[in-house]
Image: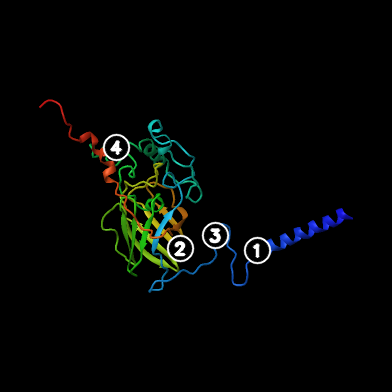
Amino acid sequence: MRIDLLNRVITAVALSIVVILCVAVTPGNGQQAPANGQFPAYRPPRMADGHPDLNGIWQAFVSANWDVQDHEAQAGPHPEIMGAYGAGPAGQGIVEGGEIPYKPQALAKKKENFDKRMLTDVGNDEKWHNLGDPELKCYMPGVPRATYMPFPFQIVQGSSQYILMSYEFASAQRIVRMNWKQEAPTPSWMGWSRGHWEGDTLVVDVTGQRPETWLDRAGDFHSEDLHVVERYTLLSPYHMMYEATIEDPQVYTRPWKISFPLYRRMEKNIQLLEFKCVPFTEQLLYGPFSKQTGGAR
């Protein structure tokens, strides 16, 4: 009898737990259950013109700056002196479908870029930009790389005509010109950004980027024909989804897409700081040309 009573008690407790769990995960009236990996519907705060307010300091927490595709942890270029300091973390890729659709000759160029990522030669005009990761040389990172570097960036949305995006790395900046038709007047490191709204999503069309920028430290690259279409969508007061479709008929067989969330920085008195890295690169780039002291006079 005691065993039978104990079994009944255990059964009743188990049923109660199941009921509690079912109630907890069942959405109430007016709520939407989020799909896997997605947020429920969110209506963001508005600017005076009625569009979502994207103002704030944002940061990506992905390891795509090392490699936009899936990658293992690996030693840096000089582990004999850098140890773990120069190592790269493992990471899940941000490329939808897993792989960049390179043309065969472009894939060979990507591998060559990686092998020569630490080489520089400013004494040769033909090789100045062909050798070394542009990040290594403190070049402005271009789009979309600026968005997923391990540095925050700030969106300043004070006007319905212009949106400023300011990046901590190399103090890079760009202006999104809303509803403009004019094409890029000349190639530039951060490109020519023209924006418009599709519902609550900011869409930015980016052209006119210089071909010297890379997509990551793995040597992924593009040509002067790069065309990027970005999409910024607020998901909550603290999260924003970033998507970018990348097209370059010289390098890829078809357009491809990246996506990842951005996080609003919430620390007290948070502000964008300076990372002006040019002084850090002077010895690397110009050391062989520095004036030598001493010797015969």
Q: Position of residue 157 (x, y in %)?
A: 35, 66
How much space separates mark 4 and mark 2, taking CA atoms?
A: 39 Å
How much space separates mark 1 and mark 2, taking CA atoms?
A: 28 Å
Res. 175 image quadrant: bottom left
| Amino acid residing under circle 2 | Thr
| Residue beneath the point at 34% across and 68% down | 158
| Amino acid residing under circle 1 | Ala
What residue is disc 3 on?
38
The residue mark sitting in front, 1 or 4, is 1
Front-most of residues 137 and 198: 137
| Residue beneath the point at 34% across and 62% down | 194
Front-most of residues 262 and 178: 262
Front-most of residues 172 and 258: 172
Of all residues, the one furthest to the left in this rendering is: 297
Which of the marked residues, 3 or 1, is nearer the chain's N terminus? 1
What residue is disc 4 on?
120
In contact (CB < 8 Å): disc 3 and disc 1? no
Which of the marked residues, 1 or 2, is nearer the chain's N terminus? 1
What residue is disc 1 on?
24
In contact (CB < 8 Å): disc 1 and disc 2? no
| Amino acid residing under circle 4 | Thr
Of all residues, the one furthest to the right in this rendering is: 1
Res. 164 image quadrant: bottom left
Q: Position of residue 91 (x, y in %)?
A: 49, 45
| Amino acid residing under circle 3 | Gln
